[in-house]
Amino acid sequence: MSKYKDAKRITTHILKAMKDDGEKISMLTTYDYSMARIVDDAGLDVILVGDSASNVMAGHETTLPITLDQMIYHASSVVKAVKRAFVVVDLPFGSYQSDPKGALKAAIRIMKESGAHGVKLEGGSEVKESIKRILMAGIPVMGHLGLTPQSIYKFGTYTVRAKEEEEAKKLLEDTKLLAKIGCFGIVLEKIPASLAKQAAASVEVPVIGIGAGPDVDGQVLVIHDMLGITKEFQPRFLRRYLDLYAEIKGAVQSYIHDVKAMEFPNEKEQY
Ligand code: KIV
């Protein structure tokens, strides 16, 4: 199905070739060793160690509290399991906004201490100097525009971004800027599908959408959402492939029953 299924390792060059060939890029978040083994074995192209770990792993309300040390912990667990996928790691809130030197330091820590293959950060022209500085050190950078959760207190809500002309214009300008300065890819989150289509067509680097419609170069979802581990979060763009919340709850209830009824362990399950 994929021209690149036998590739030993997905690289930024292969991701660009996928865009050129019209082959869609598959990307999911993952935060731990065991899940990373499964998604890599399944043939996923890109693993994002997202700062959504702050929500789905740590239970915070937003992505803001997660620290650089915690991102490195998640990323190094993922990297140990992965043979083929490209692993990109979110720079957490506060690690790249204040100055380019600090941004480079944070990116270097992620690369050195986790073994990941690239970093992702949120924003356009405002963070241009930080991106350039990181790129100069030879670290692949992925951009992230549209709904950028680290700015949730500025936006006030998680609703669709760039519906108004001015914000749409800035998003298109930022998309071109990020591609021009050397980002290997750009995530567009929760924007109108027609705008995402225009953005993806305007640059040569892969554009990956989440809630951005089908006319981009690939799709990304938070793995806990697509597996149905989270259950309250139900945006229109989310397709659930499993209802793991119910599956796991059912399995745990069966276990509780078996323990209480002394049906576990049985004769074969002991020494
Ligand atoms: O952290 C994350 O999960 C993300 C995706 C929503 C793209 O940035």
Image (cartoon, helix red, strand yellow):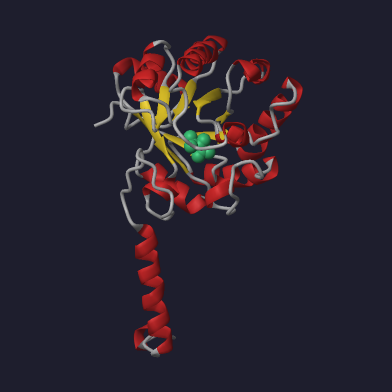
Indicate the position of residue 119 as horizontal and vertical percent values. 58, 29
**Is residue 229 rendered to the left or right of residue 144?**
left
Q: Which of 16 and 179 is in front in this view?
A: 179
Residue 198 placement, left or right of 66: left
Q: Can residue 29 be seen in this view?
A: yes
Front residue of 223/62: it is: 62
Instruction: Pinpoint residue 123: horizontal percent, then vertical percent.
Output: 58, 23
Residue at the spot 66% in from the left edge and 45% down from the top edge: 65
Of residue 164 and residue 6, the one placed in the foreground of this image is: 164
Which residue is at a point 42% across and 80% down the rendered structure image?
256
Q: Does residue 189 sit above or below 239 in this rendering?
A: above
Q: At x 50% / y 37%, what residue is drawn?
A: 158
Marker count (numbered): 0
Vertical placement of 256 versus 262: above or below?
above
Q: Identify the residue shown where x is 70% and y is 34%.
A: 94
Residue 86 visible: no
Relative to 267, residue 178 above or below: above
**Percent coordinates x, y for residue 157 in the rendering:** 53, 37
Dividing the picture into quadrants, the one containing residue 203 is top left
